[in-house]
Image (tube, grey):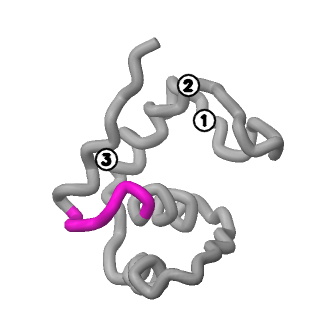
Amino acid sequence: MEYKKLNNCECYGKTVAQVALKFLIQNGIIIIPKTTHKERMQEIIELFDFTLSDEDLRQIRLLDIGWNMTGWPSDALKYNPESI
């Protein structure tokens, strides 16, 4: 299976984790990040100094391959590909 790469990070100057968490926030999903590392705490604070564009949100949605690794309902972020 081929995996797609999340290329959106470079244009925002953010990490993949920051972009992934921002995607969830912008889709109305509450995140509860946990860390004891100061560097990661700073990254979490920096989630609120940028906004993903509509096109980047669409591109991230297209990365969905239908796998659920969390145990949560798989339709939490399910989108109709026709509407993207």
Q: Residue at x 33, y 62 (%)?
A: 15
Q: Quadrant of the C terminus?
A: top left
Hey, what amino acid is under mark 2?
A: Ile
Q: CA distance from mark 3 to mark 2?
A: 19 Å
Q: Which mark sits nearer the N-terminus, 3 or 2?
A: 3
Hey, what amino acid is under mark 1?
A: Tyr
Quadrant in the rendering for residue 17: bottom left
Q: Residue at x 65, y 69 (%)?
A: 31
Q: Give the vertical position of 41 relative to 51 (above or below).
A: below
Callout 2 secondary element? loop
Q: Give the vertical position of 1 relative to 57 (above or below).
A: above
Q: How many marks?
A: 3
Image disc number at residue 65: 2
Q: Residue at x 17, y 58 (%)?
A: 11
Mark 2, Cα crowd under 10 Å, few <14 / some 14-19 / many 20+, is few
Query: Which circle, 2 or 1, is nearer the viewer?
Result: 2
**Magenta residue span:** 12-17
Hey, what amino acid is under mark 3?
A: Glu
Q: Nearer the viewer, residue 35 or 13?
A: 35
Query: Which circle, 3 or 2, is nearer the viewer?
Result: 2
Q: CA distance from mark 1 to mark 3?
A: 15 Å
Q: Residue at x 42, y 81 (%)?
A: 48
Callout 1 secondary element? loop
Q: Does residue 63 appear to the left or right of 16 in the view shown?
A: right
Residue 6, horizontal then vertical, whole percent: 33, 42
Q: Nearer the viewer, residue 12 or 44?
A: 44
Image disc number at residue 55: 3
Quadrant in the rendering for residue 5: top left
The residue identified by callout 1 is 79
